Image (spheres, rainbow, N blue to C red):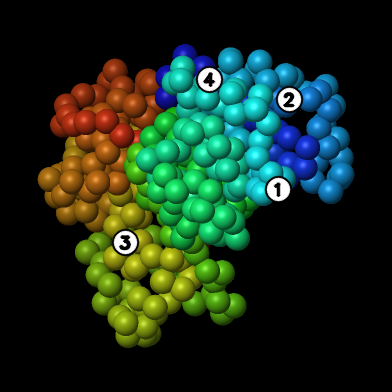
Amino acid sequence: MSAGFSHRVVAIVDDGSNPFEIGVATELFGLRRPELGCAWYEFEVCSAQPDVRMHDGMFTLSSVAGLDAVERADTVLVPNRPDPEVGPSGEVIEAVRHAARRGARLLSFCTGTFTLAAAGVLDGRRATTHWRWADLFTARFPLVRLEPDVLYVDDGDVLTAAGSAAALDLGLHLIRRDHGAEVANAVSRRLVFAVHRDGGQRQFVERPVPAVSDGSLTVLLSWARKRLDRSLTVNDLARCAAVSPATLHRRFRAELGTTPLRWLTGERVALACTLIERGERRLDVVARASGLGSASNLRVQLRRHTGLSPAQYRQRFARAELVGENAGLAGGSGGLAGGSGGLADVGR
């Protein structure tokens, strides 16, 4: 992202909001990150009232900005609804509607999806919410295409996360969209939290089940990440894990919520993204180093995962000093970035 990046994120909070989600938003968008060498977000919290009590009265946010702050927002964030059975105030609904009309990006965490739906901005669109409230949401908002079994949904200018912890997943995905894979990975390392590997404007990530206690896939994933330049297959992974391919498939589904092949391809694309960001312009070199084999397959997989051609990905996310030095990558159409490898073993 260029040094001229300027983007204001405004979170709308209400009495009873979850402090964890406010903390996630502050951590991701509100903290200065000079070590990244790029301009960062401006972050602000607003509410219909100046003092906001958090969930169970844990503490009170005082002197919070009014809802007029939403008018200055490039991204409007709605954390959880304290009680999904009770709708948001008319003031909040109108603020969200006005933001949508002027083209602001909309983001919700957990049951904040109820607020977006109440404002009518999700009609006919894909979204997710916390599984506990999925049935209520579907009954109340039948025009919304709810996907209850995913961590988050990116539907372009409207993004929704399923739960409080999924707010981190979605937030890192958004950073990846805005700043590229390398910056998102730097932030995730600071958080000691894994950035997701799949990207794109229509991304959804399957909900992972907690890893089994013996950490059976941890060693395997580390082994595979060190060998992405090789022509690894699912059978190779199974042999390394000393299990059958069928058993490996079940373990990947249980622990990571994906298949071995999807995981492996995602890791390869992630590595390719990082190499392009670092200035490598020779597609055949990137393809070999990431294990994607050929420049043509690299183009196909990069577009499938990010919606971008290599040239567009590099133009958008490569370090500024490298963009002017190198040229010649193939063109394509728009989209967003995927993650890169080397982090903790968390599924997508």
How packed mark 1 is, by other alpha carbons closer than 10 Å (few <14, some 14-19, many 20 or more), is: few
Would residue 35 be found to the left or right of residue 329 on screen?
right
- What's the residue type where badge 3 is placed? Arg
Looking at the rendered structure, the secondary structure element under dot 1 is loop
Distance between the alpha carbons at the discs numbered 1 and 3: 37 Å
Would residue 348 be found to the left or right of residue 117 on screen?
left
Comparing labels 2 and 3, the label whose residue is closer to the camera: 2
Residue ID at (46%, 73%): 254
Would residue 232 be found to the left or right of residue 319 on screen?
left
Comparing labels 1 and 3, the label whose residue is closer to the camera: 1
For mark 4, what is the residue? 98
How packed mark 4 is, by other alpha carbons closer than 10 Å (few <14, some 14-19, many 20 or more), is: some
Distance between the alpha carbons at the discs numbered 4 and 1: 24 Å
Distance between the alpha carbons at the discs numbered 2 and 1: 17 Å
For mark 2, what is the residue? 48
Distance between the alpha carbons at the discs numbered 4 and 3: 39 Å
Marks 2 and 1 in Cβ contact (< 8 Å): no
- What's the residue type where badge 2 is placed? Ala
Q: Position of residue 226 (x, y in %)?
A: 38, 60
For mark 1, what is the residue? 83
Specify which label sits upstream in the sequence, 4 or 3.
4
Quadrant into which the C terminus falls: bottom left
Q: Quadrant of residue 58?
A: top right
Residue ID at (45%, 48%): 142
Specify which label sits upstream in the sequence, 4 or 1.
1
